[in-house]
Amino acid sequence: QSYNASVSNQIRGVFLKIILYFDVFNYPLSEKEVIYFAGIPEDKGSEAKELLADMVKAGWISQHKGFFFVGSDQSVIDRRINGNRLAEKRMKTARRYSRIISWFPFVRGVFLSGSISKGYLSEKDDIDYFIVTDPGRIWVARSMLTLFKKIFLFNSFKNFCINYFIDAKHLYISEQNRFTATEVLFLLPMYNLPLYHEFIRANTWARQYYPVFRQKDTHAFNAMPLAKRFLEWLMDNGLGDRLDNYLMTASRKYIKRKYRSLDEESFNRCFRLDKRELRFLPNRHQYTILEKFANRLTAFEVQTGIRIDPDLGGK
């Protein structure tokens, strides 16, 4: 049975929000991706394809070489294809550094985030890592990894951008919007697949944006070197607690001094620096993306007269 008018309008709105969100990144989507990201069941695939075709005919979106996008700039398709190839090429590097990160004391999970987790990289993009640590050891782990980056990688972020840490007992992400939902569900598990599944279960709220999306787990591995176990044993005591507290206090002072030009609200948006979560995003990337997405929704509504219901959530 075909969709009725009310359901069709709702699904069109879902399709448009998905396409317009990825349009912020100049990233056209295939027909399969749009339908899958929207959570459309397989038995409704033909109707969904018809809806997309109708949207193209109406001039709401464009289609070329099997990709859907907004506007008339077809160069975004070649850009995407080239970026997909580069991401695939650099996945070997990402896997190697993920394994290195997993060897560090108190690291319990390593997931790829950012562009590479969506299967895309430009020449200027870094490889981003989302790291889960033992409770009470975020700052020890982060400091060791930062020291490794400074000494052995000459402080290069190209293959080793470590900007988000949480601990294994606090997997729930409280900031909830389309950006964070996309980052949560597109995280690519590299080390400790069971912990990754636990993380996804802890953040079911993200399913309101991507009801059925599941990342591939073909890159995941598990390992626990003896040297890592020994170092953890040495710091599994009050000394380790005091060291983590000291590193947190010293790091917070340094970061606040370095970014003192930011007002308190902007600083709190870019950074979260506590015992449970360490978020280091000084470029306000999340908020810039959400602002661009909101502007695209507004521009689309003005151009077409079609109102798109706003996202739920947004905490």
Image (cartoon, helix red, strand yellow):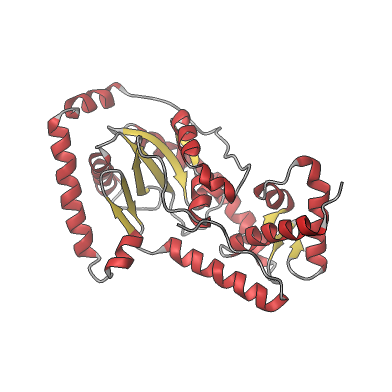
In which quarter of the view is residue 144 placed? top left
The single residue placed furthest to the bottom in the displayed view is: 302
| Residue 27 located left or right of residue 134 | right
Q: Position of residue 244 (x, y in %)?
A: 19, 40
Locate residue 243 relative to residue 153 in the image: left or right: left
Residue at 50% x, 64% y is: 290
**Quadrant occupied by the C terminus:** bottom left
x and y, in percent, of residue 113 in the image = 46, 47
Q: Quadrant of residue 142?
A: top left
At x 47%, y 52%, the residue is 114
Q: Nearer the viewer, residue 79 or 190?
A: 190
Q: Is residue 236 left or right of residue 152?
A: left
Relative to 95, is 75 above or below? below
In terms of depth relative to the viewer, which is nearer, 72 or 20?
20
Percent across and percent down for residue 14 are: 67, 57
Image location of residue 5, percent across then percent down: 81, 59
28 lies above or below 298: above
Count of number-bearing discs = 0
The extreme right residue here reads 1
